[in-house]
Amino acid sequence: MIKKILFLTGTRADFGKLKSLMHALDADEKFKVHVFITGMHVLPKYGNTGDEVDKCGFSNTFKFINQKSNDSMDTILANTIQGLSNYIHLLKPDMLVIHGDRAEALAGAIVAAFNNILVGHIEGGEVSGTIDESIRHSISKLAHLHFVANDEAKQRLRRMGEQDNNIFIIGSPDIDLMTSPELPSLESVKERYEIPFDRYSIFAYHPVTTSLHTLLDNIREIRSALVDSKRHYIAIYPNNDPGSDIIIEELESLRGNPFFRIFPSVRFEAFLVLLKHAEFMIGNSSAAIREAPFYGIPSINIGSRQNGRSSCDTIMHTTESRDEVFAAIEKINCGKFAGSDHFGSGTSAKQFLTILKTPAVWSITTQKQFVDHVLSPS
């Protein structure tokens, strides 16, 4: 019997993680892929990134507007629950696949779990420094299958009482795209986005939702350091969390500065090409912690948003202080380093497909039980 798999995507970031998995299942006759598109994807302000999902050629997509500008996270959660619930009752999928730690993903886990639909969670067991941490672990407790990036994440899920047999290490799926021979050339990306720089770095900074009272001061400190460094930057809008307008306003004030190119969004494959050829990445995006090290690109991680994430020698850490950020930019070694495979080697989609074609997966009960593992002393 053909299995209906529903993927939920709400941001350009989670689509980059899910895309290779979607394609793998879509190409297999045992599965029928459906895509629920919502969140940032349907907001013109952030570049209408849902159009990028459409361009992938999936036959069964549905767009749902779950928010207005400046809606609170709890309102977005409630709206998504209602819209997805209506859709799921019509579709009746066999499994819902979600990624990460966004409000839309939590809504998906709630709706599917309440309707006895299997929930597959991509990249659970990670840690971070915002409300996303709590959201991700909440999703993990609702999910029935866990597709994690590495053994560290698996062990965290075990400590949360998840069953060993339901945790699968497949690596980070975006690395499948990072290693793809079909990525565009740097020249074509520069032409598409009108980037004149020979040498450049990438800046991406998101709100820390638990520290909004310091956000304006922080982004102004960082902006000052970037401007004073006299380097070229490709700056990308933040996600749509509360506080994003503050960051966007500061970025837009740089639009006439010849050292900066400002974009609401960049297609994920194009972003990867730009990252691969960048001098360094700077900000508080997880891309500075995960994707940049895979390519051997140094990065400067600013602030607390990525607290607890795995680090490596190519990553510098600073506060939001102008002087600290500027000093890090002056100090950073822009040479190419050996790449890190801590988050996988580019075979996630193949492993994901193999797992979902295993009959035992479809006999997993939706009634979860907490498992008291015997843990080794630390």
Image: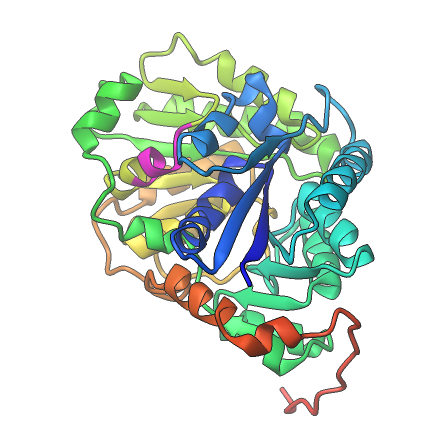
Q: Give residue 289's position: percent from left, percent from top.
A: 45, 52
Across and down, in percent, residue 366 comes to: 75, 69
Q: Residue at x 59, y 73 (%)?
A: 361
Looking at the image, residue 353 lies above or below residue 180 = below
- Verify whether residue 378 appears in magenta: no
Whole-percent x and y of residue 333?
Answer: 27, 47
Q: Is residue 16 left or right of residue 153?
A: left
Most extreme residue toward the top is 256
The quadrant where residue 202 appears: top left
Q: Inspect this view and state whether residue 2 appears.
A: yes
Please identify the quarter of the rendering in which residue 175 is found: bottom left
Range covered by the magenta-colored residues: 266-272
Q: Answer above or below: position of 112 versus 240.
A: below
| Colouring method of the image | rainbow
> Which quarter of the rendering shows the C terminus?
bottom right
The secondary structure making up most of the magenta span is helix
Vertical comparison of 86 with 122: above or below: above
Image point (55%, 28%), residue name:
221
- The quarter of the rendered structure image containing the N terminus is bottom right
53 sits left or right of 76 in the view: left
Q: Looking at this view, is 288 or 217 the one in front?
A: 288
Q: Residue at horizontal 67%, vertical 47%?
A: 105
69 left or right, relative to 354:
right
